[in-house]
Amino acid sequence: MRWIFFIFAGWMEIVGVVAVKKFAETNSKIYLLGIIVQFALSFWLLSLAMRGISMGVAYAVWTGIGAAGGVLVGIVLFKESKNASKLFFVSLILVSSIGLKLIS
């Protein structure tokens, strides 16, 4: 169950980053509310997941999910550049996160 909380925490982190991008573009208060709700949910779910996952691994993987997810969502939804270097380094984040999970 802790990994389900963890996956949803990462997902909320990505949705929160999208809300930040939309708020930056529109300055709409609804996106500001979305930022607060999504990051609050993300932290709450992370805290539930950390009851069974070590702090260092949980934070590193959660941060990796948010960073990699943010880059990938930027490429897909916001048509940001997708050069080979960017994709290579995102893959390093993902591989490192998976590696941390496997050794913990």
Image (cartoon, helix red, strand yellow):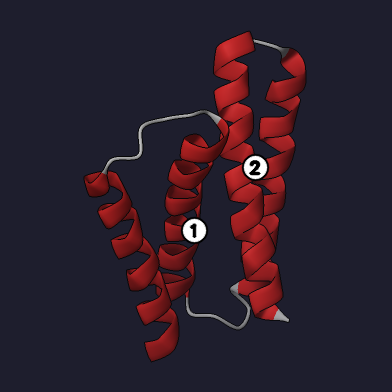
Q: State left or right for residue 73 relative to residue 103.
A: right
Kindly identify the residue that appears in the image at 73 percent across and 31 percent down. 34
Please tell me the numbered disc located at residue 65: 1
State how far apart marks 1 and 2 are (Cα): 11 Å
Examine the image and state in which quarter residue 28 appears.
Answer: top right
> Where is residue 2 shown, x and y percent of the image?
67, 78
Dot 1, how many residues are within 10 Å of its Cα: few (below 14), some (14-19), or many (20+)? Answer: many
Task: Identify which residue is drawn at 44% across, 81% down.
Answer: 101
What residue appears at the point 73 percent right and 81 percent down from the top-left corner? 1
- As drawn, which residue projects farthest toward the top? 27
User: At which x and y percent is residue 20?
Assistant: 57, 27
On residue 73, the disc is none
- Please say whether residue 104 is visible from this viewpoint: no
Q: Can residue 66 be seen in this view?
A: yes
Task: Tell me the quadrant of the picture where the C terminus can be found.
Answer: bottom left
Residue 56, percent across and down?
Answer: 40, 72
Secondary structure state at the residue bearing disc 2? helix
- What amino acid is found at the position of numbered circle 1 in the picture? Ile
- Amino acid type, label 2: Val
Give the vertical position of 52 relative to 61 (above or below): below
Where does residue 3 sit, x and y in percent of width and height?
A: 64, 77
Q: Name the residue under label 2.
A: 15
Instruction: Specify few, some or many for label 2: CA neighbours under 10 Å numbering under 14, 14-19, or 20 or more.
Output: many
Q: Is residue 59 above or below residue 86?
A: below
Which residue is more in the foreground, 22 or 74?
A: 74
Secondary structure of the residue carrying numbered label 1: helix
